[in-house]
Amino acid sequence: MKFHHLRFLNIELQRPFGIDLPNDDELINFDYRFRIILRKHLVVFAGWSILNGVGGLIALFILNGSAYYFWMMSGIWGLINFTFAIGFFYHTLYRKTPKGNYYERLWVQYHVERMMFLNIGIDAAYIFVGFWLREHSFVCDVSYPDLWLGFGWAIVMQGLFLLVQDLIFLRLYRRNFRRHNPF
C-alpha cells in the first residue's frame, strides 16, 4: 500500500461498517463487512501510532522530567505500532479473501477472534507492567525516578488504549459473525 498522504486514513474511517446490509448473498456480505471492520481496526491502530510518534517528537524538544520520558516512550510505541500496522495491512488487506469453501472463510474469522483475545491479554499485561514501573519510581533509592514514572505512565496509557480498541473491535467482529448466523 502506498501512503501518499494521510487522506487514506480519513477515507477508511468514514466508510460505513455495513452491518445492516440486506441478506442478498450472505457470504459475500459477511466477507465485505469483515474486511471493512478489519480495515477500520488497522486504520485506528495506525492513526494512534502516528499520533504517538508525532506527539513524541514534538514533546521531546519542549518538555523535561517525567513528561519528557513519557513522550519518549510514547514516540517509541508509536514507531513500533506503526510498523505492526503496516505489516498487518500487507498481511490482511493484500491477501484476497479465501476462495475456498464456506468453512475456510469462517476459519479466518475464528483466527482473528483468537488473535483479538491474545491481544487483550497482552494489553492487560502492558497495564500491569506500566503500573509496576510507576510504583518502582517511588522507591527511595531508585536511580532516575522521572524515567521510571514517565515510562510507566506511557505504558499504562498505551495498554489502556489498545485494550479499549481491541474490546470494541472484538465486539464488532463477533457481531458480524452473529449477523451471518452460519449454523
Image (spheres, grey):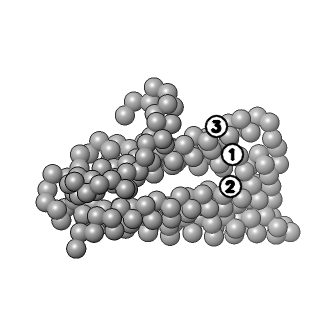
Q: Earlier in the sequence, mark 2 or mark 1?
A: 1
The answer to whether residue 117 is left or right of residue 27 is right
Q: Nearer the viewer, residue 148 or 21?
A: 21
* Residues at circles 2 and 1 in contact by the CB criterion of under 8 Å: yes
Q: Secondary structure at mark 2?
A: helix
Residue 16's label in the rendered image is none
Disc 3 crowd, CA 10 A, few/some/many (<14, 14-19, 20+): some
Residue type at mark 1 is: Met
Report the quarter where the N terminus lies.
top left
Please name the residue that numbered disc 3 is placed on.
54
Q: Is residue 48 above or below residue 1?
A: below
Residue at image point 50% right, 70% down: 121
Residue 47 lies, in percent from the top left, at: 54, 43
Gap in angstroms between the C-alphas marked 3 and 1: 11 Å
Residue 72's label in the rendered image is 1
Residue 142 lies, in percent from the top left, at: 80, 64
Residue type at mark 3 is: Val
Please name the residue that numbered disc 2 is placed on.
154
Q: Is residue 61 visible?
A: yes
